[in-house]
Amino acid sequence: MDIKNISNHLNNNVNGKGPAENGSVSADKKTSANESANNVSDKVTFGSYHTSKSEELFARIELEKLNQSSFDKLKTMKSKISEYQAAKEVSDNAANETEIGKLLNNPEVWGEIADKIIG
């Protein structure tokens, strides 16, 4: 052993690494560093996100909301018509007191209908 190599030899032993271990550890570190550089999994890629599917899902949700709203309006109008028809079977005066009956006898409503027909 040379005197020049004594300090290197002592430093390796102080760190708990022998000469053989030191070389293998640095080789292992280089190998694992290369592997981790090749296996990067936290990259952002837009190809994995399907924007067309999310847009389709959004459109379906909005369509379902509109359908539900229209169905609710239809149910409300159907119940008003049923009420008017039931009252009409009783008497004309009773039919005129329902909400539909009041709209049918309102001249402002007929004026709005005429404006829409003309315009």
Image (cartoon, grey):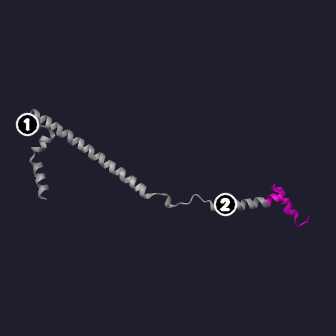
Q: Quadrant of residue 14?
A: bottom right
Point out the image quarter for the C terminus. bottom left
* Magenta-drawn segment: 1-22
First along the sequence among labels 2 and 1: 2
Q: Quick one: 15 or 34, which is closer to the camera? A: 34
Answer above or below: position of 39 versus 96. Answer: below
At label 1, the amino acid type is: Asp
Point out the image quarter for the N terminus. bottom right
The residue carrying mark 2 is 35
Q: Residue at x 73, y 59 (%)?
A: 28
Q: Which mark is residue 92?
A: 1
What whole-number distance in Å separates the C-alpha atoms at marks 2 and 1? 89 Å
Q: Nearer the viewer, mark 2 or mark 1?
A: 2
Percent from the top left, x then y, of residue 109? Answer: 12, 48
Residue 15: in magenta span: yes
Question: For this view, does 30 lie left or right of residue 109?
Answer: right
Percent from the top left, x then y, of residue 6? Answer: 88, 63
Residue 112: in magenta span: no
Q: Quick one: 62 or 52, which is closer to the camera? A: 52
